[in-house]
Image (tube, rainbow, N blue to C red):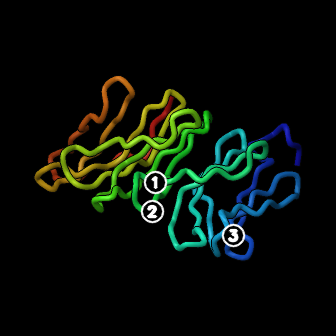
Amino acid sequence: MKSSNLTLGLLLAAVSALPALGQNYTVTNLSLGGSWSWATGINASGQVAGLAGLPNGDWHAFSWTAAGGMIDLGTLGATYSYPYGINNLGQVVGLSYTPSGQAHAFLWTQGGGMIDLGTLGGSYSYATGINNLGQVVGLSYTPSGQAHAFLWTQGGGMIDLGTLGGNYSNAYGINN
């Protein structure tokens, strides 16, 4: 494999229940010190997002790059975060629990850390996709308990995308 062809030259693999990144037939252990972890996404630059157990039993989202190694993305104040998507800028989205026990969508950036994207008025949301413009999509509960797809932007916040007549919709990906 040639390192210049990142699409073909990168391989996600699980080795002994720990995620590993294989590039040019090398394997790198991706761990935050706990007994398990796994990768959930990879971008065109080879940056990996994943979930790892910590030695104290907490579960945290992580980001890994060859140059910077492992970064614990933390949480929104509780003990659990889960990454669902990563863009080519290294921004990661997912869900994290708050101290009050609610799950909220998050956006993590290298310079800004983990940002709580809130909800559409309910107690639960998660972000599933992000494009290279930083626009985020996912699912959030409304005050009436319906689950609606959302679009989040820096300038507009979380926007309810509604449904097609039912009480459920979800957005999984967004292009540039």
Q: Secondary structure at mark 2?
A: loop
Q: Position of residue 100 (x, y in %)?
A: 27, 59
Q: Is residue 128 left or right of residue 30?
A: left
- Front one among 15 and 175: 15
Q: Residues within 10 Å of mark 1 (few under 14, many from 20)?
A: many
Q: Position of residue 105 (x, y in %)?
A: 37, 48
Q: Residues within 10 Å of mark 3 (few under 14, many from 20)?
A: some
Q: Earlier in the sequence, mark 3 or mark 1?
A: 3
Residue on which disc 1 sits: 75
Residue pictured at 27% horizontal, 34% vertical: 159
Report the amino acid beneath label 2: Tyr
Q: Secondary structure at mark 1?
A: loop
Mark toward the viewer: 3 or 1:
1
Q: Residues within 10 Å of mark 2 (few under 14, many from 20)?
A: many
Q: Is residue 148 left or right of residue 98?
A: left
Residue pictured at 88% horizontal, 43% vertical: 2
Residue on which disc 3 sits: 18
Question: Is mark 3 in CB contact (under 8 Å) with mark 2?
Answer: no
Q: Earlier in the sequence, mark 2 or mark 1?
A: 1
Report the amino acid beneath label 3: Leu
Mark toward the viewer: 3 or 2:
2
Q: Is residue 124 left or right of residue 34?
A: left
- Front one among 173 and 86: 86
Q: Secondary structure at mark 3?
A: strand
Report the amino acid beneath label 1: Thr
Q: From mark 2 to mark 1, how far is it between C-alphas?
A: 6 Å
Residue on which disc 2 sits: 80
Residue pictured at 82% horizontal, 52% vertical: 23
